Structure formats: C-alpha cells, structure tokens
Image (tube, rainbow, N blue to C red):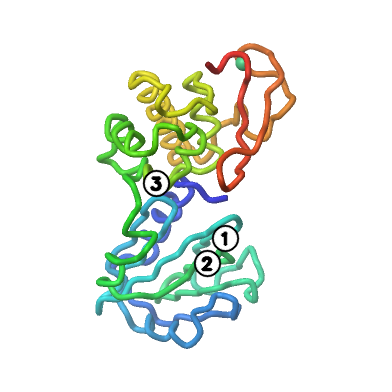
C-alpha cells in the first residue's frame, strides 16, 4: 500500500520527468484504467505541476485539466528514458505519458481520472482531505488540532488512518508511529492528553520524512506479530481495528 512517503517520492520523480514539458503521446495500453478515449485530452498538453496530496497524486496540465491518481494497494509510477527498458510488461500499464525525452508510466491502481480544476474543489474525497503530514508547512500542533476534530470515542489507531483528519498516513506508519511514541493504539482520543498526542504525531511525521528521504527505514512492529518487541522483548501483537478492519501491530506491554 502506497503511503504518503511513497507518493511524495513518486511526485518528485514525476516532477523531474514532466514538469514544464509537453505530452507528445498519452496512451492506455491496459483498458482497465477506465480513462478510455478521454486519455486523448492529455495529448499535446503541457504539465504545469505535479502535486502530492496525502496519498493522492495530481498532475496539473495547461488548459485547466487535472489528472487524479490514487495507487491503492498495488499501483506504482515508473519513469523511464524514452525507448528505455521497462521493468513491467507494457500491457500492464494503465497510463503512459511520453515527452520528447522520457515516459511516465502508471501500473495498476484503483483511481485514474481526468477532471477540470473547478471539479477538484468539489471532489468528494480530495476536497475533504486533512492536512498532509508531509507538507513542508505541517507541524505536530496542526496534527493534534486535526485529530481533536474527531469524535473523542475513536481509537487512536483508527483515527490516524482517517484521511479527513490527517492525510498521508497509512497502515504501516500508523503502527510504527504509535510504537515509536510508546502509546497504545487502542486508547481513545478523549483519553489521550495533548502531550501524548503530540508525541504520536511528531514520531509518525519523523518516520515518514525519513521514509521520504532514505527510501526505507526498518519496521519495528509492522507485520512482526509474535516476534519479540525490540524495546521490551514481549511478543508483539496484531489485531484488526476500525470500521475498515485494518490490522494494527503493537506491543501490549510497553505501549501505554
Ligand atoms: Zn514492548
């Protein structure tokens, strides 16, 4: 699952390949993209900017056109030099944007849609996103304020995934952030003081920024159920949490 750090990294690569350049060909080798003949609207358009917003990527073109991409569980963006060798079959590509020097390719992913800038402001998901944890202007105080807007009976681990509160955090960093802060993800927001909540937000942000810069940091608890806790040695636990039943990993002994 692509979380905010992966999306911001992809945005960086796409920015380098596409920003300020003209699309010479826009193609959808795999019909599952759902773009159909609308893909042609990107032909000849200039890419004005590439934006990461939480777990969403937005490609802004001239002529008021925006491409919204969400990679979901298994989508990815690759950038190749023109006529370079691909790491996946062409038939698996949902979208290929070619400029005079490179190709940006999206493989898989549940969302790929074209809209007008004005539609963006009314988009049911995009318009309601909370502050992006990897936005340069984000700080832990803003994150705490955002979480305090949720119902106080919600569990921390569940609230951290709600993109309307804070955007960009996914299942890995939800578990890792709570572990780094030493806070039990099953506690309700109303039961967690501002100092503790600040610590959770700050630790999650720090881990994600490290992920953004260094590509990868070692997982302490994610997918490590039954293995010893790196801090206290107790066996780590895993259980589904929230309405979407996303698995939370934590230490039942040292996270309080
Ligand atoms: Zn522990």
Q: Position of residue 220 (x, y in %)?
A: 60, 26
Q: Which residue is mark 3?
A: 167
Identify the residue at horizontal 49%, vertical 63% (top origin).
79
**Quadrant in the rendering for residue 227:** top right
Q: For residue 66, which numbered disc appears in the image?
A: none
Q: Secondary structure under badge 2?
A: strand
- Above or below residue 79? Residue 157 is above
Distance from label 3 to label 2 (Cα)?
A: 22 Å
Image quadrant, ligand 1: top right
Q: Which residue is mark 1?
A: 75
| Dot placed on the residue nearer the N-terminal end, 1 or 2 | 1
- Above or below residue 150? Residue 191 is above
Q: Are marks 1 and 2 in contact (CB under 8 Å)?
A: yes
Q: Which residue is mark 2?
A: 106
Q: Is residue 121 left or right of residue 150?
A: left
Residue behind label 2 places its C-beta within 8 angstroms of ligand 1: no
Q: Position of residue 246 (x, y in %)?
A: 60, 43
Q: Position of residue 115 (x, y in %)?
A: 35, 75
Q: In front: mark 1 or mark 3?
A: 3
Q: Position of residue 75 (x, y in %)?
A: 57, 60
Along the line of sight, the residue nearer the viewer: 104 or 35: 35
Q: Residues within 10 Å of mark 3 (few under 14, many from 20)?
A: many
Q: In front: mark 1 or mark 2?
A: 1
| Dot placed on the residue nearer the N-terminal end, 3 or 2 | 2
**Quadrant in the rendering for residue 31:** bottom right
């Amino acid at each position: 699952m692509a979380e905010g750090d992966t999306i911001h990294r992809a945005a960086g690569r796409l920015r380098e390949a596409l920003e300020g350049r003209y699309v010479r060909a826009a193609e959808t080798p795999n019909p599952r993209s759902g773009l159909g003949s609308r893909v042609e609207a990107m032909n000849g358009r200039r890419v004005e900017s590439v934006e990461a917003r939480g777990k969403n990527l937005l490609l802004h073109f001239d002529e008021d056109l925006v491409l919204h991409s969400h990679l979901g569980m298994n989508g990815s963006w690759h950038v190749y030099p023109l006529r370079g060798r691909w790491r996946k079959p062409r038939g698996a590509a949902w979208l290929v944007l070619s400029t005079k020097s490179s190709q940006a390719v999206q493989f898989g992913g549940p969302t790929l849609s074209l809209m007008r800038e004005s539609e963006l402001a009314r988009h049911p998901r995009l318009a309601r996103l909370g502050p992006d944890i990897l936005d340069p202007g984000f700080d832990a105080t803003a994150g705490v304020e955002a979480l305090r807007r949720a119902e106080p009976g919600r569990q921390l681990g569940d609230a951290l995934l709600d993109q309307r509160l804070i955007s960009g955090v996914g299942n890995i960093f939800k578990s890792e952030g709570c572990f780094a802060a030493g806070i039990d993800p099953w506690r309700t927001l109303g039961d967690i003081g501002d100092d503790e909540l600040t610590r959770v937000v700050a630790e999650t942000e720090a881990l994600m920024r490290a992920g953004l810069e260094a590509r990868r940091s070692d997982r302490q608890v994610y997918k490590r159920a039954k293995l010893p806790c790196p801090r206290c040695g107790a066996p780590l636990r895993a259980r589904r949490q929230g309405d979407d039943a996303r698995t939370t990993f934590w230490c039942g002994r040292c996270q309080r």
